[in-house]
Image (spheres, helix red, strand yellow):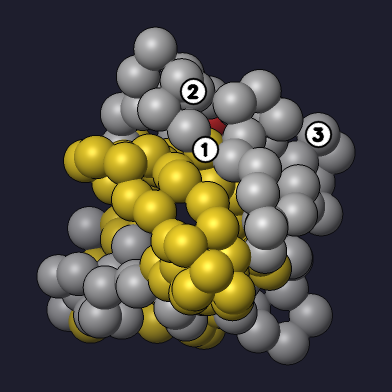
Amino acid sequence: MAITQAMCTSFKKELLEAKHNFLNSGGNTFKLALYTSSASLDASTTAYTTSNEVSGTGYTAKGNTLTRVDPTTSGTTAFTDFADTTFSSSTITARGAMIFNEDTSGDTSVLILDFGSDKSSSSGDFTIAFPAADASNAIIRIA
């Protein structure tokens, strides 16, 4: 089993089908779910799954709802991002995460995050810190 960081191939196709709306006002609900090292997630992942999802104090199935940063452009790159999200007072161990669109039929996947190793919290905050919302670093970029 492995988690490989990637933008999901199905998401790329769904962008062309206008299935995802990233605007803060009236946009879709995007969530971040955490997964153990036993999960098998990569570019071919198409939807949220409970298989090998983290469980523990301070974590509920499907994870946290993300706060979006409105899409914008810089030069020839379009991008969007999310505000950092925290699982407060949690006791969990995660190897990676999936961002998915809860408003699409089947909770379609957007991207997979690989933490590089297990990350844990023990009766504390487990925070996902997203990169700067700019053309070089934003979590979702189309160049």
Label 1 close to label 2 by CB (< 8 Å)? yes
- Check disc 3 and give the amino acid type: Gly
For the C terminus, which image quadrant?
Answer: bottom left
- Check disc 2 and give the amino acid type: Ala
Q: Tell me what residue is drawn at x 59 percent, y 26 percent.
A: 52
Where is residue 34? Give x, y as percent: 54, 46
Q: What residue sits right under mark 2 in the picture?
A: 39
Q: Is residue 95 above or below residue 119?
A: above
Where is residue 9? Give x, y as percent: 45, 29
Q: Secondary structure at mark 2?
A: loop
CA–CA distance between discs 3 and 1? 18 Å
Where is residue 17? Give x, y as percent: 65, 42
Where is residue 94? Give x, y as percent: 44, 44
CA–CA distance between discs 3 and 2? 19 Å
Q: What residue sits right under mark 3 in the picture?
A: 106
Q: How many marks?
A: 3
For the N terminus, which image quadrant?
Answer: top left
Q: Is residue 121 above or below residue 69?
A: above
Q: Tell me what residue is drawn at x 47 percent, y 62 percent.
A: 122
Crowding around mark 3 (Cα neighbors within 10 Å: few <14, some 14 to 19, many 20+) is: few
- Check disc 1 and give the amino acid type: Tyr
Instruction: Find residue 35 and name its label.
Output: 1
Q: Tell me what residue is drawn at x 38 percent, y 39 percent.
A: 95
